[in-house]
Image (cartoon, grey):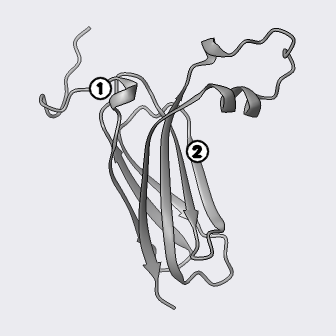
Amino acid sequence: MDIFFTDPDDVPVDPEKVKVRALSAELYPDGRRVMINLEISPFKFKPNVEINIENQEGLQISSLSIVESMVHKMEFTVHLREKEPKGNYKIKAIIFYNDLDQFKLGERESAPAEEILGETRQVVARFESSFEIKG
């Protein structure tokens, strides 16, 4: 199988070398939605991504999860769950993999997915950015 890359110098990397290249947010004119742009290193194996937005009090007001992303440049729209969004906000991105082979089922056949995924999670990158909504 032949694989072609846009940039031959930008080759996919192993999981432990995946990094966040850019994370930004742009407010929509309605003031209630945010476009998030995320770029990570090209990868050999599909990573999982979690993105959270926190207000200036540190409360999570929006989040999204991506399971096994197929692309390294991503764009999402999230809704801010506040009555009147304003002030400074943080965007936090976590890139991780799950090695389900390491989970020992044994007597835990009915273990919830959240428990299994939590125990097999291997975080490879974290990144934080911020934006402001003027009131």
Residue for point 60% across, 70% down:
80
Question: Could you classify mark 1 by the number of other residues whose Cα lies within 10 Å: few (under 14), some (14-19), or many (20 or more)?
Answer: some
Reading the image, the residue beneath label 1 is 13
Q: Is residue 50 left or right of residue 10?
A: right
Residue for point 58% across, 73% down:
55
Which quadrant of the structure image shows residue 85? bottom right
Reading the image, the residue beneath label 2 is 65
Disc 1 from disc 2: Cα separation: 22 Å
Q: Is residue 105 left or right of residue 25?
A: right
Give the image location of residue 41, x and y in percent. 30, 37
Q: Amino acid type of disc 2? A: Ser
Q: Are marks 1 and 2 in contact (CB under 8 Å)?
A: no
Q: Is residue 5 left or right of residue 27?
A: left
Residue for point 47% across, 54% down:
76
Vertical arrangement, residue 52 with respect to residue 79, above or below: above
Give the image location of residue 59, x and y in percent. 66, 68
Vertical arrangement, residue 45 with respect to residue 89, above or below: above
Which quadrant of the structure image shows residue 121? top right
Quarter of the image with the N terminus in it: top left
The dot on residue 48 is none
Vertical arrangement, residue 41 with respect to residue 128, above or below: above
Frontmost of labels 1 and 2 is 1
Residue for point 49% across, 45% down:
94
Q: Residue furthest bottom?
A: 135
Q: Dot 1: what SS?
A: loop
- Sequence-first disc among 1 and 2: 1
Q: Dot 2: what SS?
A: strand
Give the image location of residue 104, x and y in percent. 73, 12
Q: Amino acid type of disc 1? A: Val
Which quadrant of the structure image shows residue 120? top right
